[in-house]
Image (cartoon, rainbow, N blue to C red):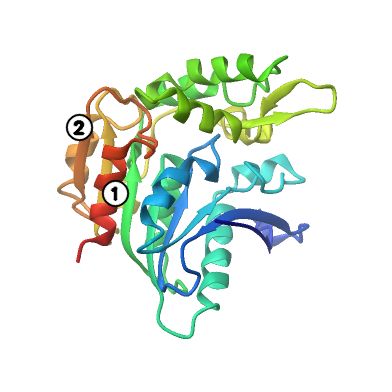
Amino acid sequence: MRLNRLLVPTASAGNESKKPHRIAYTDWGDPENPHVVVCVHGLTRNCRDFDYLARALQNDCRVICVDVVGRGQSDWLEHADDYDYYPLYLSDAIALITYIKAQYTVPMTLDWVGISMGGLIGMMLTIQPNLPVSADKLVISDIGPLIPAIALKRIAEYVGKDPRFQSFDEFKAYMKMISASFGPLTEEQWNHLAVYSVREYSDGSMGFRYDPRIAISFKTHEIKDIDLWMYWDKLITPTLVLRGMKSDILSAETAAQMKIRGAKAKVIELAGVGHAPMLVDAAQIDIVRDFILSE
């Protein structure tokens, strides 16, 4: 595994000039393998969530796992309002794909795996015209084109609060509490997620490794249902959707519609899991791997 950082332009509303930022990513597998899988995490998470999946795929694919700007090892934006400008996330993704594509002298195959927010970015990216490489397959973990306000209000209760803790164990316990909907993970898996989610401050306290200002969308907009069906209906890429059966983000009704509209996704429901299946469990990894490697 290699950890890299890429300098990319900062897209903003009004096209005003902004300081560029760096996005970090892990790079697994043979760098000459033209089958590339890009993995993108959820709202407050980071690229190391995909270590388990990347290890399972690296013999067959090159796996690029990205820290979305403001998260993990990627830069924090100078202006908080830019986190609320969704084309920025598409711009970053296209810049990364363009950079990766330039490393090949043979055609590159692209698959996208996204958990929650990462799935939304994948959905929006895949329907864009004139991409440097079109996605062959799309995997979405527990997000869909209708996101209920009640679930967004739950997320708004903890995102952006920037709590501080006096020890790693205290941090880990809090992370487990607010992330219980990830499902039954092992202690080793929880520890892995916590190690790469924690940030130590100069005073010795510990907090989350993301910019709390990413919560700006919850503070500047009325929280209501998000309806993205017009975008889903444009999607034709073969798509796999994993839904936690306890999810409050992706309802059974929305998942059922995703099977018959747009990409006509294959939907697999997972018992004992809410929002969101994290793809660290062996059974979940096998589902994704089989889909990615299928003809």
Q: Nearer the viewer, residue 51 or 177?
A: 51
Q: Which residue in the rendered view is the most extreme toward the left?
A: 260
Looking at the rendered image, the quarter that the N terminus falls into is bottom right
Residue under numbered circle 2: 253
Residue under numbered circle 1: 288
> Residue type at mark 1?
Val
For the residues labelled 1 and 2, the Cα–Cα distance comes to 22 Å
Q: Nearer the viewer, residue 126 or 70?
A: 70
Residue 233: numbered disc: none
Asked whether residue 236 appears in the rendered view, the answer is no
Q: Earlier in the sequence, mark 1 or mark 2?
A: 2
Looking at the rendered image, the quarter that the C terminus falls into is bottom left
Residue 11 vertical position relative to residue 242 in the rendered view, above or below? below
Residue at point 42%, 43% (across, down): 52
Q: Nearer the viewer, residue 124 or 55?
A: 55
Q: Which residue in the rendered view is the most extreme toward the bottom?
A: 105
Residue 282 vertical position relative to residue 39 in the rendered view, above or below? above
Q: Position of residue 252 (x, y in %)?
A: 21, 30
Residue at point 38%, 32% (across, down): 276
Q: Position of residue 2 (x, y in %)?
A: 59, 58
